[in-house]
Image (tube, rainbow, N blue to C red):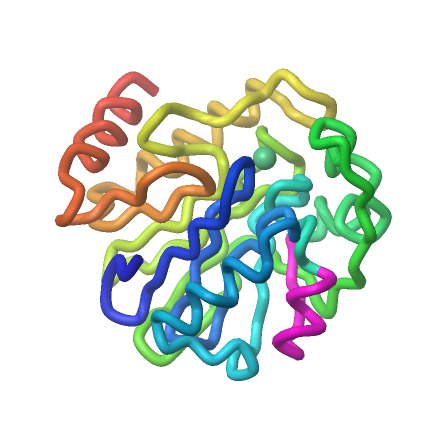
Amino acid sequence: MKIADGIYLLDGAEFDSNMFCIDNELLVDCGSGFFIEETLAQMEEYGIDPKKIKMIVITHAHFDHCGGAKEWKKITGAKVFVHENDLNALETGNGVMAEEYDAEYEGVKADGILREGEEIKTKNYTFNVIHTPGHTPGGICLWDEKKRVLISDDILTPDGVGRSDHPGANEKELLNSLRKIKKLGDIQILLPGHGAPASRYNPYAKDAIKKILEKI
Ligand SMILES: [Zn+2]
């Protein structure tokens, strides 16, 4: 589904995370890896050439977001990036919670790490990395301040805030991260890890995130 200029949601299936392709250069999250054929078909439909994707960013190393990373790295030839605090989980599988999905996780080698404040540029967007621990220690959001686009990891979706009841999670940190997000001000487009993105085409979701942040 096209969300905005150059931004496509690849929505996977079942428990897959959302995947977002930005300007056919950047792929955010990789789903579980169980439904790659379906995602490739979606890409074709949207005119996305997987071989032109240069960078894969994992918002956090949980299986539903990174299970497909190894395969997507192969398909695209792109470099994989993750926050340093989730690097070990991504590479070893320790903490990705693959057991929750009855799955075997094959770790993937990261090509680089991301830190707070780093910039990721595509043709039409400039994202800053915001470290948002709480759901996992190395969770990150990506924020384009000018275009007011937030890629929100699992910590904020129109259906609520992220879980913080599993190993590696921390409720206090999650709350602090959400306060950081609240300080960003008006979010025009929210690209969450799960569920429907919020945009002018989906004002219901925009209202929902506004209400969630008001309570933080
Ligand atoms: Zn998660």
Residue 15 versus residue 146 in the image, above or below: above
- Direction from residue 57 to residue 45 in the image, left or right: left
Quarter containing the C terminus: top left
Residue 210, how many percent across, how many down? 22, 30
Residue 179, how many percent across, how many down? 39, 30
Residue 78, how many percent across, how many down? 63, 75
- Direction from residue 63 to residue 198 in the image, left or right: left
When asked about the image quadrant of residue 207, the answer is top left
Given residues 216 and 164, the one toward you in this image is 164
Residue at the bottom extreme of this rendering: 52
Residue 54 versus residue 115 in the image, above or below: below
- Direction from residue 99 to residue 194 in the image, left or right: left
Residue in the image at 13% along x and 49% along y: 200
Residue range in magenta is 70-83
- Direction from residue 192 to residue 103 in the image, left or right: right
Residue in the image at 64% along x and 43% along y: 138
Given residues 109 and 18, the one toward you in this image is 18
When asked about the image quadrant of residue 1, the answer is bottom left
Residue 67, how many percent across, how many down? 69, 49
Residue in the image at 24% along x and 41% along y: 185
Whether residue 73 is in magenta: the answer is: yes
Total count of labels: 0
Residue in the image at 37% along x and 75% along y: 23
Residue 16 versus residue 208 in the image, above or below: below
